[in-house]
Structures are given as C-alpha cells and as structure tokens.
Image (cartoon, rainbow, N blue to C red):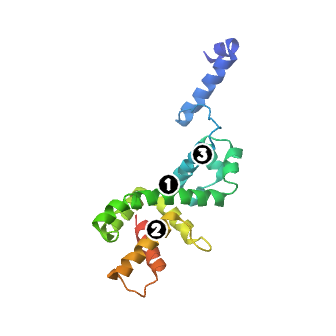
Amino acid sequence: TFCAILKTNHWTIKVLVMAKATTKTGGAQRGRRNNSDPESTRRDILQAAVEVLAKDGPESLTVSEVARRAEVNRGTAYQHFPTREDLAHATAEWVGQRMYDEFFGDFKAVAKENEFYPPALAQKRLSKFAMENPELGRAWLYDVMTSTGEVTDKFWKEYVKRLQQFIDNGHGRQDIDVEVYAFVTLVTSMMWP
C-alpha cells in the first residue's frame, strides 16, 4: 500500500512516513510550533532541560539535545541560551523558582501561626522536593554552590534570610555562619535521596 499511495499522492506519503517514524520512536508527533510566543518557547526549552536533567543528569545537558526534546529548532534554542552554561544556569533559576513557590509560597499563612518558618515543616518540604526531584535538586544545588560572587537565586536568598531569623530569635548559636548552615542543611536534603 505504501507504493500505491506514493504514485497517487505525494502529500499522503509524507504524512504516512512521518507517522511511521513517530511510531518507531514511540512518540506522538506534535503540531507545528507557534514561534510568535518567545516566553512559551523558553518555557518549553526549560521544561525539556528539566527532563534531560531528571533522566540523564547534568553531564548530559546540551542545548542541542534540549532543542530536540523541546521540538524547537536548534537556532531558536541557541537564541534563548547561547551556551550550555547559560542553559544550565537558567534551568537552575527556573527550578529555584519552583522550589521557592513550593517552599515559601504559603509563608504568609504559615507566619501567622508562627514567629518563624517551622523547622519541621521546612525539613518536610525540602525532603519532599528532593525525593520527587532528586536530579533537579542536585543540579540546582551545584549551580548555586559554584556561582561566583553573590548568589542571586530567589530560593537561596529567602532560605538564608529565614535561617537568620530563626537564629536571631534565639533558636541557634549566634556565632554561626548562616550561609554555611544553609549549605549544610540543603546538602543533607538534596544529596540524600
């Protein structure tokens, strides 16, 4: 039937060949991407980067592989993220924002009941995120810990700030280096799963 269709309708063959190729890889063919929304494209690229990190780890992260998984042109991916390092950092920032939202998203409600972020709740949320996203947590932690200069990650800054408040309220040693303490608590949470 393939040959008969080939002689009668070139367009149909193209569709059947695409369908056959899709069947071999086990994936579904997506419709053509609308490139008029750069933020949507950026989110798709970051989501694909998260998938690469979760499945294959940080060593496998390349702009080309992420473009393939996001089903965007490599040139488009390179316009958003010119280097592997840019992509890794942006992905870590995106994961940091997700961590911030999950960890501190309801802080106002929690703060009404407590003078500081409850340590048991903090540890529970960190552990939950680390267990559900082990590679993401590690990649984020690696990015934050290898940053030069001041760390600007939103989650890191808020985490350090809340730990400092905890210590200032008499729940820790006053002479402790809060960034070192933050690092130790995050490493034990993110590296354990």
Q: Mark 1 points at which residue?
A: 54
Which quarter of the image is occupied by the C terminus? Answer: bottom left
Q: Where is residue 55 in the image (x, y as percent from the top left)?
A: 50, 52
Real-space Cα separation, disc 1 to disc 3, in angstroms: 22 Å
Q: Which of marks 2 and 3 is nearer the N terminus?
A: 3
Q: Which of marks 2 and 1 is in front?
A: 2
Task: Give the amino acid at mark 2.
Answer: Glu
Q: Can residue 57 be seen in this view?
A: no
The image quadrant of residue 169 is bottom left
Task: Give the amino acid at mark 3.
Answer: Glu
Q: Earlier in the sequence, mark 1 or mark 3?
A: 3
- Taking depth in this image into account, of 78 and 52 the one nearest to the observer is 78
* Residue 179 horizontal side relative to residue 66, left or right: left
Real-space Cα separation, disc 2 to disc 3, in angstroms: 26 Å
Task: Give the amino acid at mark 1.
Answer: Ala
Q: Most extreme residue toward the front, as rendered?
A: 112
Q: Position of residue 43 (x, y in %)?
A: 56, 47
- Taking depth in this image into account, of 171 and 77 the one nearest to the observer is 171
Q: Which of marks 2 and 1 is nearer the N terminus?
A: 1
Which quarter of the image is occupied by the N terminus? Answer: top right
Q: Where is residue 132 in the image (x, y as percent from the top left)?
A: 40, 56
| Residue positioned 39% across, 76% down in the render | 165
Q: Name the residue under label 2.
A: 158
Disc number for residue 25: none
